[in-house]
Image (cartoon, coloured by chain):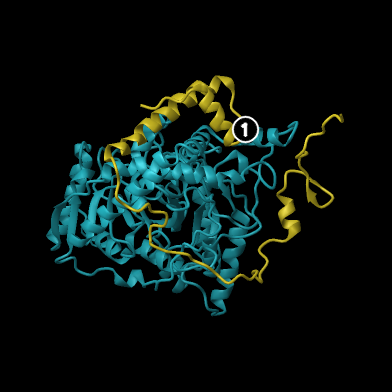
Chain colours: A yellow, B cyan
Amino acid sequence: MRKLSKEQVKNIAKLSRLGIKEFEIDKYSKEISDILTYVEQLNELGVICADPVSQITGLESVSREDIKYEQKICSKEELLKNAPEIKDDSIKVKPVFEERESI
Amino acid sequence: MLSKLSLLQAIEKLENKEISSEELTRSSLLVIENKEKDINAFITVTSEESLKAAKIVDQKRLKGEKLGKLAGIPVAVKDNFSTKNILTTAGSQILSNYIPCFDSAIVNKLKDQHAIIVGKTNMDEFAMGSSTESSFFGPTKNPRDLERVPGGSSGGSAAAVAANEVIYSLGSDTGGSIRQPASFCGVVGLKPTYGRVSRWGLLAMGSSLDQIGPFTKTVKDAAIILENIAGADKMDSTSVDREVPEYSKMLGKSVKGLKIGIPKEYFEGLDKNIEKSVMEASEILAAEGAQIIDVSLPYTKYALAVYYIIMPAEVSSNLSRYDGIKFGFRAKDAENLMETYLRSREEGFGAEVKRRIMIGAYVLSSGYYDEYYLRAQKVRALVKKDFDDVFNRVDVLITPTSPILPFKLGEKITDPLSMYLADIYTVPVNIAGVPAISVPGREVDNLPVGIQFIGPQWSEEVILNTAYVFENNRR
Protein backbone atom coordinates (compact mmCIF):
# COMPACT_ATOMS: atom_id res chain seq x y z
CA MET A 1 0.00 0.00 0.00
CA ARG A 2 1.73 3.11 -1.25
CA LYS A 3 0.78 6.49 0.17
CA LEU A 4 2.32 9.57 -1.36
CA SER A 5 2.89 12.45 1.04
CA LYS A 6 1.96 16.03 0.21
CA GLU A 7 5.64 16.82 -0.22
CA GLN A 8 6.12 13.95 -2.68
CA VAL A 9 3.14 15.09 -4.76
CA LYS A 10 4.48 18.65 -4.81
CA ASN A 11 7.88 17.35 -5.82
CA ILE A 12 6.72 15.16 -8.73
CA ALA A 13 4.46 17.99 -9.92
CA LYS A 14 7.43 20.32 -9.94
CA LEU A 15 9.67 17.76 -11.67
CA SER A 16 6.92 17.39 -14.29
CA ARG A 17 6.65 21.18 -14.63
CA LEU A 18 3.00 21.07 -13.64
CA GLY A 19 1.63 23.84 -11.48
CA ILE A 20 -0.85 22.50 -8.92
CA LYS A 21 -2.98 24.29 -6.35
CA GLU A 22 -2.63 23.57 -2.64
CA PHE A 23 -6.23 22.28 -2.44
CA GLU A 24 -5.62 19.75 -5.24
CA ILE A 25 -2.71 18.03 -3.51
CA ASP A 26 -4.81 15.71 -1.32
CA LYS A 27 -6.90 14.62 -4.29
CA TYR A 28 -3.82 13.83 -6.41
CA SER A 29 -2.14 12.13 -3.47
CA LYS A 30 -5.13 9.80 -3.03
CA GLU A 31 -5.65 9.07 -6.73
CA ILE A 32 -1.99 8.49 -7.54
CA SER A 33 -1.53 6.37 -4.40
CA ASP A 34 -4.52 4.21 -5.40
CA ILE A 35 -3.03 3.62 -8.84
CA LEU A 36 0.44 2.88 -7.47
CA THR A 37 -1.08 0.43 -5.01
CA TYR A 38 -2.89 -1.26 -7.90
CA VAL A 39 0.26 -1.60 -10.03
CA GLU A 40 2.23 -2.95 -7.08
CA GLN A 41 0.53 -6.31 -7.60
CA LEU A 42 3.52 -6.94 -9.89
CA ASN A 43 5.52 -7.48 -6.69
CA GLU A 44 3.65 -10.77 -6.20
CA LEU A 45 5.81 -12.15 -9.01
CA GLY A 46 9.02 -11.95 -6.95
CA VAL A 47 12.26 -12.19 -8.89
CA ILE A 48 11.55 -12.16 -12.63
CA CYS A 49 13.88 -14.04 -14.97
CA ALA A 50 13.04 -12.27 -18.21
CA ASP A 51 14.74 -9.61 -20.27
CA PRO A 52 12.93 -6.29 -20.15
CA VAL A 53 10.99 -5.49 -23.33
CA SER A 54 11.42 -2.09 -24.89
CA GLN A 55 10.50 -3.01 -28.48
CA ILE A 56 7.72 -5.52 -28.86
CA THR A 57 8.25 -6.69 -32.45
CA GLY A 58 11.93 -7.31 -31.85
CA LEU A 59 13.46 -4.50 -33.90
CA GLU A 60 17.02 -3.63 -32.95
CA SER A 61 19.25 -0.65 -33.70
CA VAL A 62 17.19 0.74 -36.54
CA SER A 63 19.32 3.34 -38.24
CA ARG A 64 19.31 5.46 -41.34
CA GLU A 65 21.93 7.29 -43.33
CA ASP A 66 23.13 10.40 -41.57
CA ILE A 67 21.93 12.84 -44.20
CA LYS A 68 19.40 15.62 -43.99
CA TYR A 69 16.04 15.10 -45.61
CA GLU A 70 15.87 16.88 -48.93
CA GLN A 71 12.22 17.67 -48.56
CA LYS A 72 11.54 20.45 -46.10
CA ILE A 73 8.44 19.62 -44.07
CA CYS A 74 7.68 23.10 -42.77
CA SER A 75 9.21 26.50 -43.45
CA LYS A 76 10.38 28.84 -40.70
CA GLU A 77 7.48 31.18 -41.44
CA GLU A 78 4.96 28.35 -41.12
CA LEU A 79 6.48 27.22 -37.84
CA LEU A 80 6.47 30.72 -36.40
CA LYS A 81 2.75 31.02 -37.13
CA ASN A 82 2.09 28.61 -34.27
CA ALA A 83 4.34 30.39 -31.77
CA PRO A 84 2.46 32.05 -28.92
CA GLU A 85 4.58 35.23 -29.14
CA ILE A 86 7.12 36.31 -31.73
CA LYS A 87 9.61 39.17 -31.94
CA ASP A 88 12.06 39.94 -34.74
CA ASP A 89 11.32 36.69 -36.58
CA SER A 90 12.01 34.63 -33.45
CA ILE A 91 9.99 33.03 -30.67
CA LYS A 92 9.73 35.34 -27.67
CA VAL A 93 10.15 33.78 -24.22
CA LYS A 94 10.75 34.96 -20.68
CA PRO A 95 14.42 35.34 -19.70
CA VAL A 96 16.18 32.09 -18.90
CA PHE A 97 18.58 33.78 -16.48
CA GLU A 98 17.14 36.11 -13.90
CA GLU A 99 18.78 39.46 -13.37
CA ARG A 100 20.79 39.59 -10.18
CA GLU A 101 21.82 42.58 -8.18
CA SER A 102 25.51 43.30 -8.67
CA ILE A 103 27.71 42.83 -5.65
CA MET B 1 -29.15 8.44 -47.18
CA LEU B 2 -25.96 7.79 -49.13
CA SER B 3 -23.65 8.09 -46.14
CA LYS B 4 -25.27 4.88 -44.83
CA LEU B 5 -23.38 2.92 -47.49
CA SER B 6 -20.54 0.64 -46.53
CA LEU B 7 -17.10 1.47 -47.92
CA LEU B 8 -17.32 -1.39 -50.43
CA GLN B 9 -20.75 -0.23 -51.64
CA ALA B 10 -19.55 3.36 -51.94
CA ILE B 11 -16.48 2.29 -53.94
CA GLU B 12 -18.66 0.27 -56.33
CA LYS B 13 -21.26 3.00 -56.81
CA LEU B 14 -18.59 5.62 -57.42
CA GLU B 15 -16.67 3.42 -59.84
CA ASN B 16 -19.88 2.64 -61.76
CA LYS B 17 -20.70 6.37 -61.75
CA GLU B 18 -24.08 5.65 -60.10
CA ILE B 19 -23.28 8.41 -57.63
CA SER B 20 -20.78 11.25 -57.52
CA SER B 21 -18.36 12.03 -54.76
CA GLU B 22 -20.05 15.41 -54.37
CA GLU B 23 -23.41 13.73 -53.70
CA LEU B 24 -21.83 11.33 -51.23
CA THR B 25 -19.91 14.10 -49.45
CA ARG B 26 -22.99 16.32 -49.29
CA SER B 27 -24.94 13.43 -47.76
CA SER B 28 -22.23 12.98 -45.16
CA LEU B 29 -22.12 16.70 -44.35
CA LEU B 30 -25.91 16.85 -44.08
CA VAL B 31 -25.99 14.00 -41.56
CA ILE B 32 -23.21 15.75 -39.61
CA GLU B 33 -25.21 18.98 -39.60
CA ASN B 34 -28.32 17.21 -38.33
CA LYS B 35 -26.74 14.98 -35.73
CA GLU B 36 -23.79 16.89 -34.32
CA LYS B 37 -25.77 18.85 -31.74
CA ASP B 38 -26.75 15.53 -30.16
CA ILE B 39 -23.61 13.48 -30.70
CA ASN B 40 -20.64 15.89 -30.80
CA ALA B 41 -18.43 13.41 -32.64
CA PHE B 42 -16.41 16.16 -34.32
CA ILE B 43 -14.08 18.87 -33.08
CA THR B 44 -13.63 20.31 -36.58
CA VAL B 45 -15.76 19.82 -39.71
CA THR B 46 -14.12 20.87 -42.96
CA SER B 47 -17.23 21.31 -45.12
CA GLU B 48 -15.87 23.68 -47.74
CA GLU B 49 -12.54 21.96 -48.26
CA SER B 50 -14.16 18.53 -48.49
CA LEU B 51 -16.74 19.62 -51.05
CA LYS B 52 -14.00 21.24 -53.10
CA ALA B 53 -11.93 18.05 -52.94
CA ALA B 54 -15.00 15.95 -53.88
CA LYS B 55 -15.66 18.06 -56.98
CA ILE B 56 -12.04 17.65 -58.07
CA VAL B 57 -12.32 13.87 -57.70
CA ASP B 58 -15.53 13.86 -59.75
CA GLN B 59 -13.84 15.81 -62.53
CA LYS B 60 -10.86 13.47 -62.51
CA ARG B 61 -13.18 10.48 -62.70
CA LEU B 62 -15.11 11.96 -65.62
CA LYS B 63 -11.84 12.51 -67.44
CA GLY B 64 -10.94 8.90 -66.78
CA GLU B 65 -7.86 9.76 -64.71
CA LYS B 66 -6.40 7.10 -62.44
CA LEU B 67 -7.80 7.39 -58.92
CA GLY B 68 -6.98 5.72 -55.61
CA LYS B 69 -9.20 3.01 -54.15
CA LEU B 70 -10.54 5.36 -51.49
CA ALA B 71 -11.12 8.23 -53.94
CA GLY B 72 -14.07 10.48 -53.29
CA ILE B 73 -15.16 8.78 -50.09
CA PRO B 74 -15.80 10.82 -46.91
CA VAL B 75 -13.63 9.85 -43.95
CA ALA B 76 -13.15 11.33 -40.47
CA VAL B 77 -9.82 11.18 -38.66
CA LYS B 78 -9.18 11.39 -34.94
CA ASP B 79 -7.96 14.77 -33.80
CA ASN B 80 -4.53 13.44 -32.83
CA PHE B 81 -3.56 12.98 -36.50
CA SER B 82 -1.59 16.00 -37.71
CA THR B 83 -3.45 17.63 -40.58
CA LYS B 84 -1.91 20.42 -42.61
CA ASN B 85 -3.79 23.70 -42.22
CA ILE B 86 -6.52 22.01 -40.15
CA LEU B 87 -6.83 22.52 -36.39
CA THR B 88 -5.31 19.55 -34.51
CA THR B 89 -6.08 19.63 -30.79
CA ALA B 90 -5.85 16.04 -29.48
CA GLY B 91 -8.89 17.06 -27.43
CA SER B 92 -6.75 19.35 -25.28
CA GLN B 93 -6.86 23.00 -24.37
CA ILE B 94 -3.09 23.16 -24.65
CA LEU B 95 -3.43 22.58 -28.43
CA SER B 96 -6.74 24.41 -28.86
CA ASN B 97 -5.13 26.83 -31.34
CA TYR B 98 -2.60 24.51 -32.99
CA ILE B 99 -2.64 24.26 -36.80
CA PRO B 100 0.07 21.90 -38.10
CA CYS B 101 2.08 22.78 -41.20
CA PHE B 102 2.34 19.13 -42.25
CA ASP B 103 0.21 16.01 -42.70
CA SER B 104 0.77 12.81 -40.76
CA ALA B 105 1.93 9.83 -42.84
CA ILE B 106 -1.53 8.27 -42.89
CA VAL B 107 -3.32 11.50 -43.79
CA ASN B 108 -0.80 11.77 -46.64
CA LYS B 109 -1.75 8.27 -47.74
CA LEU B 110 -5.46 9.16 -47.63
CA LYS B 111 -4.83 12.27 -49.70
CA ASP B 112 -2.72 10.30 -52.21
CA GLN B 113 -5.76 8.06 -52.58
CA HIS B 114 -7.99 11.13 -53.13
CA ALA B 115 -9.97 10.41 -49.96
CA ILE B 116 -12.26 13.21 -48.71
CA ILE B 117 -11.42 14.23 -45.15
CA VAL B 118 -14.61 15.76 -43.77
CA GLY B 119 -13.30 16.50 -40.31
CA LYS B 120 -11.43 15.71 -37.13
CA THR B 121 -13.10 13.66 -34.44
CA ASN B 122 -13.48 14.17 -30.73
CA MET B 123 -11.36 12.15 -28.30
CA ASP B 124 -10.33 11.89 -24.70
CA GLU B 125 -7.61 14.46 -24.05
CA PHE B 126 -4.39 13.13 -25.63
CA ALA B 127 -6.19 9.79 -26.00
CA MET B 128 -6.25 9.25 -22.23
CA GLY B 129 -9.59 7.79 -21.28
CA SER B 130 -12.24 5.21 -22.09
CA SER B 131 -15.29 7.41 -22.51
CA THR B 132 -14.38 10.56 -24.53
CA GLU B 133 -15.51 12.56 -21.48
CA SER B 134 -12.07 14.07 -20.83
CA SER B 135 -12.10 16.06 -24.08
CA PHE B 136 -11.68 19.83 -23.65
CA PHE B 137 -14.42 20.12 -26.29
CA GLY B 138 -17.12 18.32 -24.30
CA PRO B 139 -18.11 14.66 -24.35
CA THR B 140 -19.28 12.68 -27.38
CA LYS B 141 -22.57 10.80 -26.94
CA ASN B 142 -23.22 7.24 -28.02
CA PRO B 143 -25.46 7.36 -31.12
CA ARG B 144 -27.21 4.22 -29.88
CA ASP B 145 -28.23 5.87 -26.60
CA LEU B 146 -27.47 9.54 -26.06
CA GLU B 147 -27.29 9.11 -22.28
CA ARG B 148 -24.35 6.75 -22.66
CA VAL B 149 -20.70 7.23 -23.53
CA PRO B 150 -19.36 6.06 -26.90
CA GLY B 151 -16.28 4.58 -25.25
CA GLY B 152 -12.86 6.02 -25.77
CA SER B 153 -10.49 7.37 -26.43
CA SER B 154 -11.47 7.36 -30.13
CA GLY B 155 -15.15 7.89 -29.19
CA GLY B 156 -15.71 10.52 -31.87
CA SER B 157 -14.42 8.29 -34.67
CA ALA B 158 -16.60 5.37 -33.49
CA ALA B 159 -19.71 7.52 -33.07
CA ALA B 160 -19.22 9.20 -36.48
CA VAL B 161 -19.34 5.80 -38.22
CA ALA B 162 -22.18 4.46 -36.06
CA ALA B 163 -24.28 7.56 -36.81
CA ASN B 164 -23.53 7.32 -40.57
CA GLU B 165 -21.86 10.72 -40.47
CA VAL B 166 -19.03 9.18 -42.53
CA ILE B 167 -18.38 5.95 -44.42
CA TYR B 168 -15.39 5.04 -42.25
CA SER B 169 -12.96 6.69 -39.86
CA LEU B 170 -9.52 6.32 -38.36
CA GLY B 171 -8.45 6.20 -34.75
CA SER B 172 -5.50 5.24 -32.59
CA ASP B 173 -5.30 2.44 -30.03
CA THR B 174 -2.85 2.44 -27.10
CA GLY B 175 -4.78 0.22 -24.68
CA GLY B 176 -8.08 -0.37 -26.46
CA SER B 177 -8.94 3.08 -27.82
CA ILE B 178 -10.19 1.70 -31.15
CA ARG B 179 -11.70 -1.62 -30.08
CA GLN B 180 -13.57 -0.50 -26.95
CA PRO B 181 -15.43 2.42 -28.62
CA ALA B 182 -16.13 0.16 -31.63
CA SER B 183 -17.67 -2.31 -29.17
CA PHE B 184 -19.71 0.43 -27.42
CA CYS B 185 -21.01 1.95 -30.67
CA GLY B 186 -21.69 -1.30 -32.54
CA VAL B 187 -19.14 -0.92 -35.35
CA VAL B 188 -16.02 -2.79 -36.46
CA GLY B 189 -12.69 -1.59 -35.02
CA LEU B 190 -9.25 -2.98 -35.89
CA LYS B 191 -5.95 -2.52 -34.07
CA PRO B 192 -3.17 -3.87 -36.30
CA THR B 193 0.15 -5.34 -35.14
CA TYR B 194 2.44 -2.74 -33.57
CA GLY B 195 4.47 -1.27 -36.44
CA ARG B 196 2.06 -2.34 -39.21
CA VAL B 197 0.93 1.27 -39.81
CA SER B 198 3.17 4.35 -39.68
CA ARG B 199 2.68 6.54 -36.61
CA TRP B 200 4.57 9.47 -38.09
CA GLY B 201 2.64 12.67 -37.37
CA LEU B 202 0.32 10.97 -34.87
CA LEU B 203 0.52 12.92 -31.60
CA ALA B 204 2.24 10.35 -29.42
CA MET B 205 0.82 9.01 -26.18
CA GLY B 206 2.59 5.71 -25.37
CA SER B 207 5.02 5.25 -28.24
CA SER B 208 5.75 1.57 -27.60
CA LEU B 209 2.00 0.81 -27.63
CA ASP B 210 0.29 3.26 -30.02
CA GLN B 211 -1.07 1.94 -33.30
CA ILE B 212 -3.42 3.40 -35.92
CA GLY B 213 -6.44 1.54 -37.29
CA PRO B 214 -9.88 1.89 -38.90
CA PHE B 215 -13.50 2.03 -37.75
CA THR B 216 -15.84 0.60 -40.36
CA LYS B 217 -19.34 -0.77 -40.85
CA THR B 218 -18.14 -4.19 -42.04
CA VAL B 219 -15.11 -6.45 -41.62
CA LYS B 220 -14.38 -6.31 -45.35
CA ASP B 221 -14.24 -2.51 -45.14
CA ALA B 222 -11.65 -2.78 -42.36
CA ALA B 223 -9.57 -5.08 -44.57
CA ILE B 224 -9.75 -2.58 -47.44
CA ILE B 225 -8.61 0.28 -45.21
CA LEU B 226 -5.79 -1.73 -43.67
CA GLU B 227 -4.32 -2.74 -47.03
CA ASN B 228 -4.36 0.93 -48.00
CA ILE B 229 -2.68 2.34 -44.87
CA ALA B 230 -0.26 -0.43 -43.83
CA GLY B 231 3.42 -0.50 -44.70
CA ALA B 232 6.87 0.67 -43.68
CA ASP B 233 7.69 4.36 -43.47
CA LYS B 234 11.22 5.72 -43.22
CA MET B 235 9.86 8.47 -40.97
CA ASP B 236 8.69 5.93 -38.36
CA SER B 237 11.61 3.73 -37.36
CA THR B 238 9.27 1.37 -35.50
CA SER B 239 7.21 0.63 -38.62
CA VAL B 240 8.18 -2.72 -40.07
CA ASP B 241 9.17 -3.52 -43.64
CA ARG B 242 6.98 -6.50 -44.39
CA GLU B 243 4.87 -7.18 -47.40
CA VAL B 244 1.30 -5.87 -47.10
CA PRO B 245 -1.10 -8.61 -48.18
CA GLU B 246 -4.31 -7.80 -50.05
CA TYR B 247 -6.34 -8.46 -46.92
CA SER B 248 -9.73 -7.85 -48.57
CA LYS B 249 -9.08 -10.61 -51.13
CA MET B 250 -8.25 -13.13 -48.42
CA LEU B 251 -11.70 -13.09 -46.83
CA GLY B 252 -14.34 -15.78 -46.97
CA LYS B 253 -12.03 -18.74 -46.53
CA SER B 254 -13.57 -21.63 -44.62
CA VAL B 255 -12.76 -21.76 -40.91
CA LYS B 256 -12.90 -25.56 -40.98
CA GLY B 257 -10.14 -26.82 -38.72
CA LEU B 258 -9.27 -23.33 -37.49
CA LYS B 259 -8.29 -23.55 -33.82
CA ILE B 260 -9.99 -20.87 -31.75
CA GLY B 261 -8.88 -20.49 -28.12
CA ILE B 262 -11.12 -19.31 -25.32
CA PRO B 263 -8.85 -17.86 -22.63
CA LYS B 264 -10.45 -18.47 -19.25
CA GLU B 265 -8.91 -15.32 -17.72
CA TYR B 266 -11.10 -13.17 -19.97
CA PHE B 267 -14.29 -14.61 -18.52
CA GLU B 268 -13.62 -14.46 -14.78
CA GLY B 269 -16.31 -12.38 -13.12
CA LEU B 270 -17.68 -11.33 -16.50
CA ASP B 271 -21.24 -10.08 -16.92
CA LYS B 272 -23.26 -13.22 -17.76
CA ASN B 273 -25.05 -11.58 -20.68
CA ILE B 274 -21.82 -10.45 -22.31
CA GLU B 275 -20.41 -13.94 -21.77
CA LYS B 276 -23.46 -15.43 -23.50
CA SER B 277 -22.88 -13.17 -26.48
CA VAL B 278 -19.24 -14.29 -26.79
CA MET B 279 -20.14 -17.96 -26.37
CA GLU B 280 -22.78 -17.63 -29.05
CA ALA B 281 -20.14 -16.20 -31.39
CA SER B 282 -17.85 -19.15 -30.69
CA GLU B 283 -20.72 -21.58 -31.34
CA ILE B 284 -21.42 -19.91 -34.69
CA LEU B 285 -17.79 -20.41 -35.68
CA ALA B 286 -17.84 -23.99 -34.34
CA ALA B 287 -20.87 -24.67 -36.55
CA GLU B 288 -18.72 -23.51 -39.48
CA GLY B 289 -16.12 -26.11 -38.60
CA ALA B 290 -13.78 -24.24 -36.24
CA GLN B 291 -12.35 -26.13 -33.31
CA ILE B 292 -12.97 -24.41 -29.96
CA ILE B 293 -10.25 -24.99 -27.36
CA ASP B 294 -10.06 -23.82 -23.75
CA VAL B 295 -6.76 -22.06 -23.09
CA SER B 296 -5.12 -19.99 -20.37
CA LEU B 297 -2.96 -16.87 -20.40
CA PRO B 298 -1.84 -16.82 -16.77
CA TYR B 299 -0.18 -13.39 -16.83
CA THR B 300 -3.32 -11.62 -18.07
CA LYS B 301 -4.11 -10.22 -14.64
CA TYR B 302 -0.77 -8.39 -14.58
CA ALA B 303 -1.12 -6.79 -18.01
CA LEU B 304 -3.17 -3.84 -16.78
CA ALA B 305 -0.64 -3.12 -14.03
CA VAL B 306 2.18 -3.26 -16.59
CA TYR B 307 0.18 -0.85 -18.75
CA TYR B 308 -0.36 1.66 -15.96
CA ILE B 309 3.40 1.87 -15.45
CA ILE B 310 4.74 1.81 -19.01
CA MET B 311 2.07 4.05 -20.55
CA PRO B 312 2.34 6.91 -18.00
CA ALA B 313 6.14 6.69 -18.19
CA GLU B 314 5.96 7.21 -21.95
CA VAL B 315 3.26 9.88 -21.52
CA SER B 316 5.39 11.88 -19.10
CA SER B 317 8.18 11.91 -21.65
CA ASN B 318 6.05 12.48 -24.79
CA LEU B 319 4.02 15.30 -23.29
CA SER B 320 7.02 17.25 -22.05
CA ARG B 321 7.05 19.00 -25.45
CA TYR B 322 3.85 20.88 -24.59
CA ASP B 323 5.44 23.63 -22.57
CA GLY B 324 3.93 26.87 -23.89
CA ILE B 325 7.08 27.86 -25.78
CA LYS B 326 7.01 26.97 -29.47
CA PHE B 327 3.36 26.20 -30.16
CA GLY B 328 0.02 25.73 -28.47
CA PHE B 329 -1.37 27.47 -25.41
CA ARG B 330 0.84 29.76 -23.30
CA ALA B 331 -0.34 31.10 -19.94
CA LYS B 332 -0.64 34.88 -19.83
CA ASP B 333 1.45 37.14 -17.64
CA ALA B 334 3.96 34.61 -16.35
CA GLU B 335 6.78 36.27 -14.41
CA ASN B 336 9.61 34.04 -15.60
CA LEU B 337 10.35 30.99 -17.71
CA MET B 338 9.63 28.48 -14.93
CA GLU B 339 6.26 30.09 -14.39
CA THR B 340 5.53 29.91 -18.14
CA TYR B 341 6.09 26.14 -17.98
CA LEU B 342 4.21 25.54 -14.74
CA ARG B 343 1.18 27.64 -15.56
CA SER B 344 0.87 26.79 -19.27
CA ARG B 345 0.82 23.11 -18.35
CA GLU B 346 -1.40 23.63 -15.30
CA GLU B 347 -4.01 25.58 -17.26
CA GLY B 348 -3.58 23.71 -20.56
CA PHE B 349 -3.86 20.09 -19.37
CA GLY B 350 -6.89 18.40 -17.81
CA ALA B 351 -6.92 16.27 -14.65
CA GLU B 352 -6.41 12.83 -16.23
CA VAL B 353 -3.42 14.01 -18.26
CA LYS B 354 -1.81 15.60 -15.20
CA ARG B 355 -2.37 12.44 -13.19
CA ARG B 356 -0.67 10.28 -15.79
CA ILE B 357 2.25 12.68 -16.24
CA MET B 358 2.86 12.63 -12.48
CA ILE B 359 2.61 8.84 -12.25
CA GLY B 360 5.04 8.60 -15.15
CA ALA B 361 7.50 10.99 -13.55
CA TYR B 362 7.26 9.00 -10.31
CA VAL B 363 7.82 5.52 -11.78
CA LEU B 364 10.79 6.79 -13.79
CA SER B 365 12.42 8.73 -10.96
CA SER B 366 15.67 7.49 -9.53
CA GLY B 367 15.03 5.17 -6.63
CA TYR B 368 11.73 3.96 -8.12
CA TYR B 369 12.81 3.12 -11.68
CA ASP B 370 13.85 -0.47 -10.89
CA GLU B 371 10.88 -1.12 -8.65
CA TYR B 372 8.27 0.07 -11.16
CA TYR B 373 9.43 0.72 -14.71
CA LEU B 374 12.08 -1.98 -15.12
CA ARG B 375 9.86 -4.54 -13.41
CA ALA B 376 6.96 -3.64 -15.71
CA GLN B 377 9.18 -4.08 -18.77
CA LYS B 378 10.12 -7.56 -17.53
CA VAL B 379 6.52 -8.55 -16.87
CA ARG B 380 5.74 -7.24 -20.36
CA ALA B 381 8.02 -10.00 -21.64
CA LEU B 382 5.98 -12.55 -19.66
CA VAL B 383 2.68 -11.26 -21.04
CA LYS B 384 4.15 -11.48 -24.55
CA LYS B 385 5.34 -15.03 -23.84
CA ASP B 386 1.81 -15.99 -22.74
CA PHE B 387 0.57 -15.05 -26.20
CA ASP B 388 3.53 -16.74 -27.96
CA ASP B 389 2.81 -19.97 -26.04
CA VAL B 390 -0.92 -19.94 -26.62
CA PHE B 391 -0.47 -19.26 -30.34
CA ASN B 392 1.56 -22.45 -30.56
CA ARG B 393 -1.68 -24.23 -29.72
CA VAL B 394 -4.38 -22.13 -31.38
CA ASP B 395 -4.66 -19.80 -34.39
CA VAL B 396 -6.81 -17.11 -32.89
CA LEU B 397 -8.40 -16.15 -29.55
CA ILE B 398 -12.01 -15.12 -28.96
CA THR B 399 -12.81 -12.82 -26.01
CA PRO B 400 -15.19 -10.05 -25.08
CA THR B 401 -13.86 -6.62 -26.12
CA SER B 402 -15.13 -4.93 -22.97
CA PRO B 403 -16.11 -6.36 -19.57
CA ILE B 404 -19.02 -3.91 -19.38
CA LEU B 405 -21.79 -2.49 -21.53
CA PRO B 406 -21.68 1.19 -22.59
CA PHE B 407 -22.05 3.11 -19.32
CA LYS B 408 -23.83 6.39 -18.63
CA LEU B 409 -22.09 9.74 -18.91
CA GLY B 410 -20.62 10.80 -15.59
CA GLU B 411 -20.78 7.28 -14.14
CA LYS B 412 -17.03 6.61 -13.99
CA ILE B 413 -15.30 9.91 -14.65
CA THR B 414 -14.76 10.61 -10.95
CA ASP B 415 -13.10 7.26 -10.25
CA PRO B 416 -9.96 6.85 -12.39
CA LEU B 417 -9.24 3.27 -11.37
CA SER B 418 -12.72 1.98 -12.26
CA MET B 419 -12.35 3.70 -15.67
CA TYR B 420 -9.01 1.92 -16.14
CA LEU B 421 -10.62 -1.47 -15.48
CA ALA B 422 -12.87 -0.94 -18.52
CA ASP B 423 -9.78 -1.73 -20.64
CA ILE B 424 -8.86 -4.99 -18.97
CA TYR B 425 -9.47 -7.17 -22.10
CA THR B 426 -7.97 -4.80 -24.64
CA VAL B 427 -4.76 -3.72 -22.88
CA PRO B 428 -2.92 -7.11 -22.99
CA VAL B 429 -3.08 -6.93 -26.80
CA ASN B 430 -1.10 -3.67 -26.88
CA ILE B 431 1.33 -4.97 -24.27
CA ALA B 432 2.10 -7.93 -26.58
CA GLY B 433 1.97 -5.87 -29.80
CA VAL B 434 -0.45 -8.34 -31.40
CA PRO B 435 -3.38 -7.45 -33.67
CA ALA B 436 -7.04 -7.62 -32.63
CA ILE B 437 -10.42 -6.74 -34.05
CA SER B 438 -13.74 -5.96 -32.40
CA VAL B 439 -16.84 -6.95 -34.31
CA PRO B 440 -20.47 -6.53 -33.14
CA GLY B 441 -22.02 -9.63 -31.56
CA ARG B 442 -25.46 -10.26 -30.10
CA GLU B 443 -26.69 -7.18 -28.27
CA VAL B 444 -27.58 -7.12 -24.58
CA ASP B 445 -30.45 -4.89 -23.37
CA ASN B 446 -30.47 -3.21 -26.76
CA LEU B 447 -26.83 -2.16 -26.32
CA PRO B 448 -23.96 -3.23 -28.58
CA VAL B 449 -21.50 -5.93 -27.48
CA GLY B 450 -18.14 -6.32 -29.21
CA ILE B 451 -16.54 -9.70 -29.84
CA GLN B 452 -12.74 -9.49 -29.91
CA PHE B 453 -10.55 -11.74 -32.05
CA ILE B 454 -6.84 -11.69 -31.24
CA GLY B 455 -4.09 -13.24 -33.39
CA PRO B 456 -0.28 -13.53 -33.36
CA GLN B 457 1.80 -10.60 -34.62
CA TRP B 458 1.36 -10.05 -38.39
CA SER B 459 -1.68 -12.34 -38.62
CA GLU B 460 -4.23 -9.67 -39.56
CA GLU B 461 -5.57 -11.82 -42.39
CA VAL B 462 -6.46 -14.57 -39.90
CA ILE B 463 -8.38 -12.39 -37.45
CA LEU B 464 -10.06 -10.53 -40.32
CA ASN B 465 -11.19 -13.78 -41.92
CA THR B 466 -12.45 -15.20 -38.61
CA ALA B 467 -14.37 -11.99 -37.92
CA TYR B 468 -15.69 -12.03 -41.49
CA VAL B 469 -17.01 -15.58 -41.22
CA PHE B 470 -18.64 -14.71 -37.90
CA GLU B 471 -20.16 -11.52 -39.31
CA ASN B 472 -21.66 -13.41 -42.23
CA ASN B 473 -23.17 -16.15 -40.09
CA ARG B 474 -24.39 -13.93 -37.26
CA ARG B 475 -27.97 -14.73 -36.33
Residue ID at (48%, 39%): B360
Depicted B275 relative to depicted A80: above or below: above
Tell whether B41 sits left or right of B280. Answer: right
Extreme-bottom residue of the structure: B64
The quadrant of the rendering that contains the N terminus of chain B is bottom left
Chain containing the residue with disc 1 = B
Extreme-front residue of the structure: A103
Tell whether B145 sits left or right of B289. Answer: right
Q: Position of residue A88 (x, y in %)?
A: 84, 50
Residue bearing mark 1 = B347
Residue ID at (72%, 61%): A75
Q: Position of residue B276 (x, y in %)?
A: 18, 43
Q: Position of residue A23 (x, y in %)?
A: 55, 19
Mark 1: which amino acid?
Answer: Glu
Q: Position of residue B140 (x, y in %)?
A: 47, 40
Residue B408 appears anywhere in the view: no
Tell whether B364 sits left or right of B261. Answer: right
Depicted A85 relative to depicted A103: above or below: below
Residue ID at (45%, 41%): B369
Residue A13 appears anywhere in the view: yes
Categorize mark 1 by other alpha carbons within 10 Å: few (<14), some (14-19), many (20+): some
Q: How many marks do you count on the picture? A: 1
Dot 1: element: helix
Quarter of the image for residue A44 reads: top left
Tell whether B243 sits left or right of B469. Answer: right
Extreme-top residue of the structure: A23
